[in-house]
Image: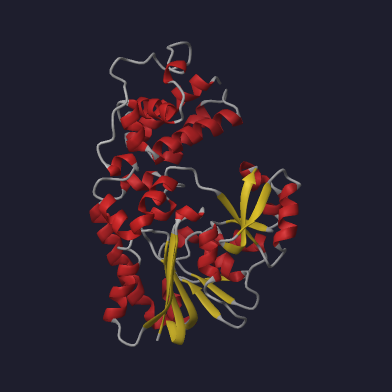
């Protein structure tokens, strides 16, 4: 495919997404219908689409409209290229530019930095001087991180094993088990290092949340909102720790057994009715449902789907989870609250309200990781009684 044909395909895909279709479903459907497209074409179009979704408001201003066509015109202008070279009307290329498809000035910081108008004040209040740098980072593609599985290898050997499959990786200061992939990220799933369980895809800040738990042999740990099991696996990589995984939606955990087998880890999956019979636990980690604002570089559609009402609903859910799981933590144990959010509404405010309402509990640790460091945005707080 020519570069112009890739732009036209991206326009068609974006129009479907803007009409409400799920991002991955549209991309997968296009790829299945477009057998003529090679792997490089599919990768380039995917990048176009995700870049446009990350920068939907600013690209719309630069491109003259919020349509798929407008976003791609804006994307090309933002890159410093001339859209006239792509919008030629030739075979498989987008139609030539119209007189009204011109850029305009940004009308607000929220538009310039690609956030909803209602969210921008909360974003600034949450991040203060880091708000603009974080918003700019969210306009870019996220790095790819791996977790070294210490049950099977160490960082040096993992890097060497990845290199044999054409994947370059380097240690990251964010977490000792983390590797940042600098080349060959799309080869990871087919690599021997991944197939043999030497490494697992996991953001570095997500790894750091687990590392902060300071786990020791003999501890019994519950990952209460386990989802796909990334943190459960990271916990299980601590030798001698007994790991339990739970999620209110058990279907989210369907991949955990296969992932654990590949990693050489042991994880016991519990349904809600089984929790009390296995508790209390030394550590209960609640990576609570949240806005996902810390991972919007990877899932940019979530940035535009979030509403003020939904954010309020999430804070209620988060508070309820903390209250509900307190009986599962043994006396002197730790309740670790975490989110992949950068918003104070879901982080500091939730913990502070919990401490106000629950006498006898105190906080021993609080930390936030920001996207300006390269990782996703994460928050965690350790609570004990």
> Residue 300: x and y, percent?
40, 44
User: Is residue 229 at all visible to an observer of this figure?
Assistant: no
From the viewer's side, name the closer residue of 310 and 106: 106
In this picture the colour scheme is secondary structure
- Left or right: 170 with respect to 65? right
Q: Looking at the image, how many numbered discs can be counted on the residues? A: 0
Q: Give me the residue at 60% from left, 70% from top.
A: 236
Is the N terminus in the top left, top right, bottom left or bottom right quadrant? top right
Q: Is residue 178 above or below residue 139?
A: below
Q: Is residue 327 above or below residue 162?
A: below
Q: Give me the residue at 57% from left, 81% from top.
A: 219
Hey, which quadrant is residue 358 in on the image? bottom left
> Residue 340: x and y, percent?
42, 59
- Left or right: 158 with respect to 176? right
Q: Give me the residue at 32% from left, 26% from top.
A: 103
> Residue 381: x and y, percent?
42, 72
Is the C terminus in the top left, top right, bottom left or bottom right quadrant? bottom left
> Residue 4: x and y, percent?
49, 20
- Left or right: 205 with respect to 55? right
Q: Is residue 292 above or below residue 222?
A: above
Q: Is residue 98 above or below residue 324?
A: above
From the viewer's side, name the closer residue of 179 and 268: 179
Q: Give me the residue at 30% from left, 15% from top.
A: 99
User: Is residue 78 at all visible to an observer of this figure?
Assistant: yes
- Left or right: 41 with respect to 318? right
Residue farthest to the front, as pictured: 129
From the viewer's side, name the closer residue of 127 and 203: 127
């Amino acid at each position: 495919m020519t570069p112009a044909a890739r732009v036209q395909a991206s326009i068609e895909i974006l129009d479907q997404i803007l009409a409400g279709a799920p991002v991955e479903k549209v991309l997968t459907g296009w790829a299945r219908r477009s057998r003529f497209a090679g792997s490089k074409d599919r990768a380039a179009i995917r990048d176009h689409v995700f870049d446009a979704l990350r920068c939907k408001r600013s690209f719309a201003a630069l491109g003259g409209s919020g349509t798929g066509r407008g976003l791609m015109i804006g994307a090309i202008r933002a890159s410093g290229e001339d859209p006239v070279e792509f919008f030629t009307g030739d075979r498989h290329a987008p139609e030539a530019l119209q007189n009204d498809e011109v850029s305009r000035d940004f009308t607000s910081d929220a538009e310039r930095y690609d956030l909803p108008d209602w969210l921008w004040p909360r974003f600034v209040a949450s991040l203060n001087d880091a708000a603009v740098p974080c918003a700019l980072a969210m306009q870019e593609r996220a790095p790819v991180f791996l977790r070294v599985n210490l049950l099977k290898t160490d960082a040096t050997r993992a890097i060497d094993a990845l290199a044999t499959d054409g994947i370059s990786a380097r240690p990251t200061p964010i977490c000792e088990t983390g590797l940042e992939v600098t080349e060959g990220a799309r080869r990871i799933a087919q690599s021997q290092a991944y197939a043999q369980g030497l490494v697992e895809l996991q953001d570095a800040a997500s790894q750091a949340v687990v590392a902060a738990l300071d786990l020791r042999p003999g501890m019994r740990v519950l990952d209460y909102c386990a989802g796909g099991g990334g943190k459960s696996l990271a916990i299980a990589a601590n030798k001698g720790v007994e790991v339990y995984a739970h999620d209110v939606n058990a279907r989210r955990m369907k991949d955990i057994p296969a992932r654990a087998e590949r990693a050489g880890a042991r994880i016991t999956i519990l349904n809600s009715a089984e929790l009390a019979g296995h508790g209390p636990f030394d550590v209960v980690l609640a990576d609570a449902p949240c806005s996902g604002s810390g991972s919007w570089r990877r899932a940019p559609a979530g940035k535009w789907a979030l509403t003020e009402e939904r954010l309020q609903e999430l804070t209620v859910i988060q508070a309820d989870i903390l209250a509900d799981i307190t009986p599962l933590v043994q006396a002197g144990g730790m309740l670790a609250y975490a989110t992949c959010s950068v918003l104070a509404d879901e982080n500091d405010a939730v913990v502070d309200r919990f401490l106000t309402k629950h006498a006898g509990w105190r906080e021993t640790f609080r930390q936030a990781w920001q996207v300006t460091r390269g990782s996703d945005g994460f928050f965690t707080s350790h609570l004990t009684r």
